[in-house]
Structure formats: structure tokens, C-alpha cells
Image (tube, rainbow, N blue to C red):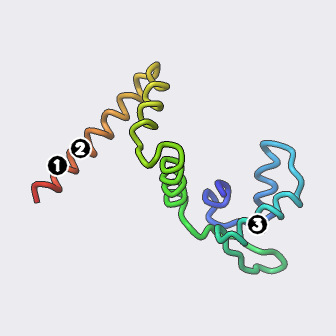
Amino acid sequence: MKIIWKRGSSTVREVYEDLLTRRKIAYTTVMTMMGTLEQKGHLRKSERGRAYVYVPVEPETKVISNMVQEFVKRVFNGSPKPLLIHLVDNLSRDDEQLDEIRALLKEKKLLKEKRREK
């Protein structure tokens, strides 16, 4: 999916060749996986010449958001707080990332306060 999101659309051959630069994989494995992703509704295919071109049905940000929400629901009973605490504890050695998170939280808080004022 990451390859197709990055490219916008891809054939099985294009995904296969991209994956080959990172690891050894069989062409048929890629073809089977893309067929499975299409059957599950994650990809849509159309014919281009003698090959099928696959495009993502949902944007990457939406899929990631849904996956994170589902994960939080299953693992943390719907509360993101334990996940955030875990992430912050594991980032404690990286001041730059902690500063970025602080800035994002501050920005989110300011936006929330502005909405309340309206």
C-alpha cells in the first residue's frame, strides 16, 4: 500500500520492482497480495494495455487514522492517554521530538480555545 500511495497508481510489476530493491520477493507473492487488497476494497484496478493498474481507494492519512483508532479501541479500551504516555516515555531521550510534540499539543489547545470563543 505504501508504494501505491507514494506513486498514486502502480502495476504489479512496478510494485514488485520497487520491493526488489529492498528484499527478495516473488512476483506471484506481490500479485496475490495486490489481488487480496483489491478484494478487500483497499485497491481498485483498471486495465491499461495488457496490465492492470491499481489505485488506492482511500488516502493514506484516512487509513492510518482508522487503524490507530481501531488499535486504541482494542488495546486501550478507547482511551488514547495510555498510548500517549507510553510514546512520551519512550521518546524521553529525544528532546527534539518532545519539543515537536509539545508544540503540536499547544497548537491543538489554542485551536480548541478559539472554537470555544466563537
Residue drawn at (26%, 38%), measured in percent from left and top? 106
Frontmost residue, 99 versus 70: 70
Residue drawn at (82%, 42%), measured in percent from left and top? 23
In the orientation shown, which residue stands out farthest toward the left?
117
Disc 2/disc 3 C-alpha distance (Å): 41 Å
Give, as a three-letter code, the residue at label 3. Thr
- Residue 39 image point, x, y percent: 72, 72
Q: Secondary structure at mark 1?
A: helix
The label shown at residue 109 is 2
Q: Secondary structure at mark 3?
A: helix
- Residue 65 image point, x, y percent: 48, 55
The label shown at residue 113 is 1
67 with respect to 40 (left or right): left
96 with respect to 2 (left or right): left
Pointer 3: what residue? 36
Give, as a three-letter code, the residue at label 1. Glu
Q: Are marks 2 and 1 in contact (CB under 8 Å)?
A: yes
77 with respect to 117 (left or right): right
Frontmost residue, 43 versus 46: 43
